Image: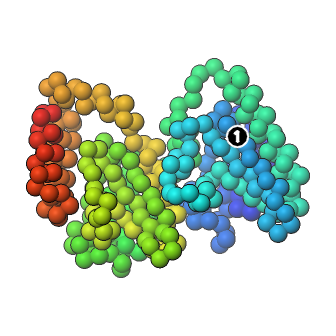
Amino acid sequence: MEELRGHHGTWRIDGETVRIRFDSGRKVPTLLKSLGSCSVPMAAVREVVFDRGGRKHGWRLRLRLAEGTDPYAALGVPGHDGLTPLLITGPHEGELLAEYFSDQIAASARLTRETLTEELDPREVARGLVARPPLQVRTAEGSASFDGTRVRLQWDGWLASTVKEKEKSRDYQLSEIESVQWYPPVDITEGYLRIVLRGVTIPEATALDNDLFTLASHGSKGSEETLLMAATVNTHVAPAEETGAGTAALGTGAVTDDGGEAIFSKIRELGRLHAEGLLTDEEFGAKKAQLLDRL
């Protein structure tokens, strides 16, 4: 098994997989320390980007994966490409070895794709790049935890707003979640993790202090940890086409106990949004009627 040592960890290749293990030193990015290790099937690698750099900055090696297999690709904003476990950097004197390693990965990935006998499962590839539940992360506002079936937001930090401190916590079942969004802190603005529920829309103007679907991070404290949480939960969320089958069944009157509970849960959530002034009377009434029609 060939090995490449970088600034923050070690990459190993065995012909079918790139296995990555991160260090735990003070200078290692929090995302990588929190993740610890991950693995990438060669068949998922679509591009290997190598930059020789220079004496000051050293070399960079970056993997680009097949569509739908990189759980970090859809999160954050342009310019934060460095927040990924798929990048390794190293000092200038190791440039030749790193370039050789880059060529080996590219050749192995190409060969694996050409001889692949069955399609990759994008979710399985993505889960190899995130944390395993249970996972808990903290910010100055509180914490987020994920046990594989439920996400809990708890606002018990010293920077929690009065509204969130009064609410204390909320639980969101995985079956209710459409996705988890993540935004990094920019300049003096707060970063945050946001739960997006299926069929529930939050007005864009809602302040973070009043948004009970969010856990805010301030500066670097908790920002990369919440990125890992968002990526991890998203790999466990069922795709829209799978949930669409359940919705079709509801429309025909074939409502299971779980389906009915999911609808009432959404109605309760809409009621909270309405009580908090985030939905007008008309919006609440219309959305509630739509959900009741599915019972």
Q: Position of residue 179 (x, y in %)?
A: 38, 47
Q: Residue at x 10, y 48 (%)?
A: 285
Density class for disc 1 (Cα within 10 Å; few <14, some 14-19, many ≥20) is some
Depth order, front residue of 35/113 = 113
Residue at point 42%, 42% (across, down): 236
Which of 139/49 is in front?
49
Query: Which residue appears at 11% of the width and 41% of the height?
Result: 289
Figure quadrant of the N terminus: top right
Residue 276 x %, y % = 17, 64
Q: Quadrant of residue 194?
A: bottom left
In the picture of the structure, the residue carrying the numbered disc 1 is: 47
> Can residue 153 be seen at all in this image of the molecule?
no
218 shown above or below 230: below
Count of numbered marks: 1
217 up-or-down from 230: above or below: below
Which amino acid lies under the numbered mark 1 shown in the image of this protein? Glu
Side (left or right) of 255 relative to 31? left
- Residue 175 location, quadrant: top left
Horizontal arrangement in the rendering, residue 82 relative to residue 233 (left or right): right
Q: In the orientation shown, which residue stands out farthest toward the bottom?
A: 158
Q: Please, what secondary structure does the residue beneath circle 1 have?
A: strand
Quarter where residue 111 is shown: top right
Residue 292: give x, y in percent of width and height.
11, 38
Q: Is residue 291 above or below residue 138?
A: above
Question: Does residue 42 appear in this view?
Answer: yes
Residue at the extreme top of the image, as rendered: 117
Quadrant of the rendering where the C terminus is positioned? top left
| Residue found at x 57% / y 29% | 120
- Residue 9, horizontal then vertical, whole percent: 71, 58
